[in-house]
Image (cartoon, coloured by chain):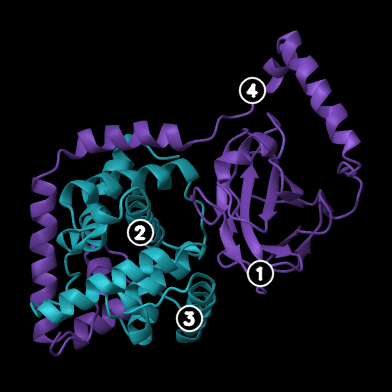
Chain colours: A cyan, B purple
Amino acid sequence: MHGAGSVAELYRKHAPALHRRCLGIVGNPDDARDLVQETFARYLAAGARFADATPFAVLYRIATNASIDRLRRKKTASEDELDDNAAPSDSGSGSADPNHTARRVDALHDLVFLTRGLSEEEVTVAVLHHLDGYTQDGIAESLDLSRRTVGKMLAKFEDHLKKRAARTGFTAKAANDG
Amino acid sequence: MADRRFTDLELERSLAGDLSPARSAALAAEATEADKARLAELERDQAEYLRGVDVDAEVRRIEQRAERYKPEPRRGWLRWFLPLGTLVAAAAALVLFLQSKKPAPRPDDGDDFRTKGDDVSLVIHSEAHQLANGDTVTPGTKIRFEAQGGKPGFIAIVGVDGAHSTTVYYPYGAREATAIGKERLLPGAIQLDATPGDETFFALFSTKPFPIDAVLPAVTGAGTLPPGIAMSRVVLHKK
């Protein structure tokens, strides 16, 4: 379905943004580079036949979920690996505010724990809202979704969060801010 | 993000040529100085990233990894020549299966059929109407999946096309089934490609999370379902 030439073209077009996305979550350039590879590999292996999503949208969704999944596995393997030293780099807000960075780390910790079991699209929306600080309008415009769909996904996430928190006794710090 | 009217994601999509025409026009007309500065910064980052990467080498690694992520295809006529021991094991598994007193699915059970009780039933919708098991569709038809059932749990939709190629349609390209609640019409649509022959779609459901790799042997006919997972399938014929 994809020749090497078209994969290279796809890579040149989308890899930088995907690397930024992955780096913004995992905070480590080598991991981010590996996740970009994984993202493209999964995209090619699955056969990109989605009619209602552009390659960028699908790749972005895979990259976001792969990054969260990577952190989740690291967190499971060792709680220490997801510490503040592996803080995610900011995804473009340009804030040097240490409080902002701390909130972002809190949000990331919460998201890694709380998004398990959600769909890829819901994870992507939750990360954009709770980690990157996007408004619902911003997410809707960025992902070509209706504002209503974004609202429903975030409401589902909140519901999922409450149930999971009730089940585990977990108290989300940053996700509740959103 | 002072005076920003466009998100980073929109600016990145713009750089990738992926922004919708309407938003592209809006970006051209309404971008603030801060938006333009950020766009230029992202463009520089993009160029710098590509300078630091051997794209051809990356593509080779990606293609190698993609092969690993592809499920084993069914082996077609070769399966008739499986070693005798494997056949004996399959017969033993069949006896165990029958002893479990759970009825095996039969293709004539209706528009779709269910296994392991009523935990899941796959329904496929085209743009115009609901498709029935065995319907003939044309390449390019857009379809959506609905996983009917009463229990919350975890769902995956997998397809096996006429070339025995397996695709995880929902959650797309994932390795684990995803949570499903009361909303049963799954998000997203797919467009059928031109691969001729039957394409079989499987809904796999469990009340507990499960890795999709664990169910692939069952959907490709190379094994059985792990315990606790229900399966429903719909076959469409492409012509």
Q: Is residue A6 above or below residue B140?
A: above
Q: Secondary structure at mark 2?
A: helix
User: Where does label 3 land, which residue?
Assistant: A158
Secondary structure type for disc 1: loop
The number of callouts visible is 4
Q: Are marks 3 and 2 in contact (CB under 8 Å)?
A: no
Give the amino acid at mark 2.
Ile
* Residue A77 numbered tag: none
Residue bearing mark 4 = B75
- Identified by mark 4, the residue type is Arg
Whether tag 1 and tag 4 are in contact, CB under 8 A, the answer is no
Mark 3 or mark 1, whichever is nearer to me: 3
- The residue under label 1 is B185
Q: Which residue is mark 2?
A: A68
Q: Which image quadrant: the N terminus of chain B?
A: bottom left
Q: Chain of mark 1?
A: B
* Amino acid at circle 1: Leu
Task: Give me the C-alpha separation between circle 3 and circle 4.
Answer: 45 Å
- Residue at 26% across / 58% down in the picture? A82
Residue A178 appearing in the image: no
Residue type, mark 3 in image = Glu
Task: State which tag comes first along the sequence, 1 or 4.
Answer: 4
Tell me which residue sits at (17%, 86%) in the image: B4
Chain of the residue where label 4 is placed in the rendered structure: B
- Give the side of residue B150 with respect to residue A157, left or right: right
The answer to whether residue A158 is left or right of residue A83 is right
Q: Are marks 2 and 4 on the same chain?
A: no
